[in-house]
Image: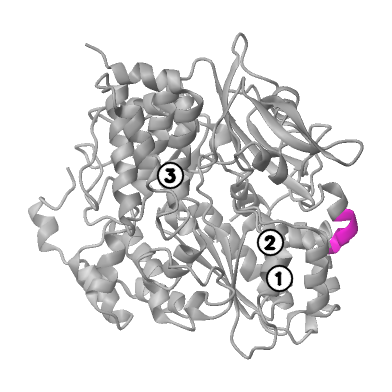
Amino acid sequence: MTAKPFVMPAPHPRERRIIFENISRPDYDTSLDTYLKHGGYESLKKALAMKPAEIIDVIKASNLRGRGGAGFPCGAKWSFIRYDDGKPHYIVVNADESEPGTFKDRYILHYDPHQLIEGLVMSAYATNTHLCYIYIRCEFPEAAKIVWKAIQEATAKGYVGKNILGSGFDCDIYVHQGAGAYICGEETSLLESLEGKRPYPRIKPPYFPAVLGLYMKPTVVNNVETICHVKHILRLGAEEYAKMGTPGDGGTRTMCVSGDVVKPGFYELPAGAVTLGELIFDICGGLKPGRTLKAVIPGGSSAKVLRADEVFKVKVKGADGAMEEKELKVLDVVMDAAGLTSVGTMVGSGGVMVMDDTREMVWALNNLNQFYAHESCGQCTPCREGSLWMSKITTRMLDGGGQGADPKTLKNVADNIAGRTICAFGEACSWPTQSFLAKFPEEFDQAAVGKE
Amino acid sequence: MTTGTDPKAIATRQADLVTPEMETEIDEIITHYPVSKRSASLPLLHIWQNHFGSVDDTGIEWIAAKLELQPINIIELVTFYPWFRREAGGKTIIRVCRTLACAMAGGYEVKEKFCSVVGLDPQAEHHGFGAAPPTSSDGKFSVEFVECLASCGSAPVALINDTLHENISLEAVTAIVEKYQ
């Protein structure tokens, strides 16, 4: 089965396509032959000739950060696995992409599965892993078939399975399908799901599945895009790869832009290369005619919203080396981990949702609240009760039944979820409410008056 | 409505209808989990639901026995994951994305249009976990909202059986439904 033809638009001059380089080729398909024609599995040969510890050093030097949302340094995560501890190790690829606003992994899985497989075998070799799973959400049924077919093709040619390319290294890869639960993107929930249990996130500590992961054995859980980057880091060399990004955030980052822009889509850009304004107005063609920018959610729906006319005071290093305070407008915020963190939000999974002046903020928040109320797994009381409560309040406000105390109640509920739950879903569901209320108080006050 | 209220449906035990091909597929997929057979519970539920359209009590018992588990180990999954159903929906299931980017691009109107084209009440919602989604009287179509389908750049989108439809305009809905008649 090959995917239906997908034509990627020509790259914007600011783009640097590495992950999406092959997918951009007009004649590219998902077969192994096509992949080999374009240098496929060459990096794997290179990796198998290296010592595993050397590969981890290269990944560390590349400053690769996880692309799933939390942004944890990938090399550090891998080095938690002790190569020779005598235990079985596992790698689980998190292909449960479901953060609203994010849609990059979908294209990798559907249109370049071998890239993921090659990166995965290299990652397995570096961490002494012989069994890997790719956890794909079941709403990507075609992707599961395409990836599984690619694994079988690669196995037949000796790139996966026993004695890979004569190196003596064995690694099996299987596809596992989810069943429609957003919470399974949380890594410990994903592992419970893969073990066949009800996917309640695990209690921390241990904070890393590298200590106790799948079947209580050391496990690496990485996002699809992260694993693909591994291949390119070895191909390009750590130095050149790191140079593309900013210090501490190497390589390229795929920004997924949706909402009220002329050209929504995903754009692979060097990390930290563009500001929010450049992303929206240069790369995505700006807003629709006659509209003005109102709000941006910069890193997937859980990231705190930014208001178009906000001005931040941030500390930057001046020319003389001393820290000085500077004013920063929203459109000048740099779209990387450091830039977005400095204004109180996050780069997250790279899902940028743009809203123009026609959007009502109570409506937008209510949409997200309904999402979180539906997806809360129900394990922790503050989240299970609170997410539904927030959703009920905003729905009532929208229907004209607002009450004076609603904004205060909403804030109170949200404040009592974040930090009081087992997993980060608690923060994810309260940050939208907290930030929408703080940034657009006038709209919530107005909706709280109610309609006769 | 193709729900459990159909007397014929009640009389049918899914576990009695397992085909040899299905069992071969099931035995093969269990080999993907050399460490723990319990891990195969989700894939087995998928195979079951793909075949029967739902998972009934006999299915839960059959899968549990196959994996040497208690039925509760399977029930706790069927009642958790929104994907699994105790009652089958229509032959074609139209899952329209409800979340923000699609909603901004008109996802709610698209869902209502799908409902009216296949003859359902546009405001119909389904009730309760595992219940069948609103289904047309001829049993051909079900329409429901799902949460983010991860295709926000081509909103609004809908997953129809295994195929994603993108940038759906209200005008295109009738032609899309026609393809699945």
Residue at far right of view = A320
Residue at far left of view = B7
Residue at mark 2: chain: A
- Amino acid type, mark 2: Ile
Q: Secondary structure at mark 1?
A: helix
Coloring applied to the structure: one colour
Q: In what quadrant of the picture does the C terminus of chain A appear?
A: top left
Picture quarter containing residue B116?
top left
The span shown in magenta is: A234-241
Q: Looking at the image, can residue A59 be seen?
A: yes
Work out whether B68 lies above or below A55: below
Q: Are marks 2 and 3 on the same chain?
A: yes
Residue A97 lies, in percent from the top left, at 54, 51
Q: Which residue is mark 3?
A: A429
Is A47 on the left or on the right of A203, as rendered? right
Residue shown at the point (60%, 39%) measured from the top left: A344
Dot label at residue A227: 2
Residue A428 lies, in percent from the top left, at 47, 46
Q: Distance between the Cα atoms at labels 2 and 3?
A: 27 Å
Residue shown at the point (63%, 68%) measured from the top left: A151
Is A300 on the left or on the right of B110, as rendered? right
Is B142 on the left or on the right of A321, as rendered? left
Q: Are marks 1 and 2 on the same chain?
A: yes
Q: Is-magenta flag for residue A116?
A: no
